[in-house]
Amino acid sequence: MARNTIEAGENIPKHIAMIMDGNGRWAKKRLMPRSFGHKMGMERMIGLMEHAFDLGVDYVTVYALSTENLKRPKEELDGLFDLIRNHFAQYMERVCARGVRLRILGDTSLLPKDVQKILVESEEKTAAYEGKGINVALGYGARAEIVRAANLAVEKGERLTEESFSGLLYTGGQPDPDLVIRTGKEVRLSNFLLYQAAYAELYFTDKMFPEFSDKDLEEAFKWYACRVRRFGKTDEQL
Ligand code: IPE
Ligand code: IPE
Ligand code: MG
C-alpha cells in the first residue's frame, strides 16, 4: 500500500535549503500586489521551518534576498525591508525558541542600517544555541560568498583545503545541505549555495512559494528518502 505520511526521523535530510520563489506571480494571479505575496511567503517560511524541525531536520537555510534582487525597484525592496522591520524579530523568536541558532548569510552591509540592527539583535538572542540552525540568506550571492572566502584566505596567507575553505563560507561549521527545494517552476540555482550544494539532491516544484504547504514539504521529503546518494561510488560499494 502506498504510504502517504512521513514519520519524524525517517531518512530525513539533516539540512534543507529552500529557494523561496514565486511570491510575486502567486500574488499577481490573485490580483494582489507583489508585497502581499512576500508577506504570505514570509508566513509560509515560518510554518515550513517549524514543520521541518518537527520532522527532525537540524538546519534550514532559506534564500530570502539575493545580491541580484537588490536591483529590483525601490518600492519592492522597501516593502521587503518593512516586512523585516515589522515581523522578523518576532517570527524568529518563535521558531528559535526551540533552541535553534539563527545565522544571516550574506553581505548585510548592502541592507539599510536599521534592518542590519534587527538582524544582528535576532542573531545574538540565539547565540547560545547549538546543534540546530536557521540560516536566512539576505543580500546573499554564492559567487560573492566564494570570492569573500578566497580573500579571507589570502589575507591570512593560508593554503586551503576543501574543509578549511568551507569553514570560511557564511555556513562555516555547518553540514552541507542534503536537499535543495526550489518552488516557483524555475529549474535553476540563481546563485545559491554553489559550493555547499555540490552533492545536494535538487527538488523543483511548480508550486509558488506561498502555496507550498506542509504536506508539499513532506512530499519533497518522501522523494528525498527514495534517492540513492552514491557520492561517486557504484551501487555495490554502498
Ligand atoms: C521570491 O519571489 C522572493 C524574492 C526573490 C524576494 P519572487 O519575488 O521572485 O516572485 P516571482 O518569481 O516574481 O513570482
Ligand atoms: C531567487 O529567486 C532568489 C530568491 C528566492 C531570494 P529569483 O526570482 O530572484 O530568481 P531568478 O531571477 O528568477 O533567477
Ligand atoms: Mg522569482
Image (cartoon, grey):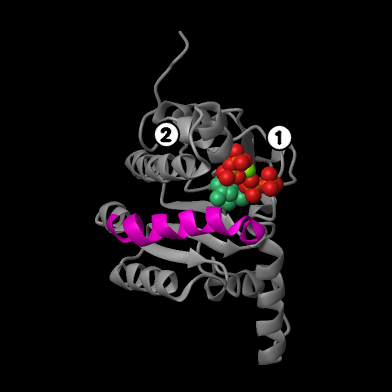
Crowd rating for badge 2 (residues with CA inside 10 Å; few <14, some 14–19, many 20+): few
* Disc on res. 36: none
Q: Amino acid at mark 2?
A: Glu
SS for tag 2? loop
Q: Quadrant of the C terminus?
A: top right
Residues marked 1 and 2 touching at CB (< 8 Å): no
Q: Considering only vertical position in the picture, is 233 above or below 221? A: below
For label 1, the residue is 235
Residue 71 magenta-highlighted: yes
Q: Considering only vertical position in the picture, is 116 above or below 180? A: below
For label 2, the residue is 10
Q: Nearer the viewer, mark 1 or mark 2?
A: 2
SS for tag 1? helix
> In x, y percent, where is residue 16?
51, 46
Residue 2 magenta-highlighted: no
Q: Considering only vertical position in the picture, is 84 above or below 157? A: above
Q: Could you tell me how far apart the alpha carbons at marks 1 and 2 are, in whole angstroms?
A: 21 Å
View extreme (top): residue = 1
Relative to residue 17, is residue 119 drawn left or right?
left
Q: Quadrant of the N terminus?
A: top left
> In x, y percent, where is residue 81?
46, 60
Sequence-earlier tag: 1 or 2 = 2
> In x, y percent, where is residue 71?
66, 60
Dominant SS of magenta comes to helix
Nearest to the observer: residue 49 or residue 108: 108
The residue located at (37%, 45%) in the rendering is 46
The answer to whether one can see residue 21 in this image is no
> In x, y percent, where is residue 176?
57, 56
Q: Considering only vertical position in the picture, is 224 above or below 173? A: above
Relative to residue 115, is residue 195 drawn left or right?
right
- For the residue with label 1, is its CB less than 8 Å from the closest atom of ligand 2? no
- Which residues make up the magenta segment? 69-90
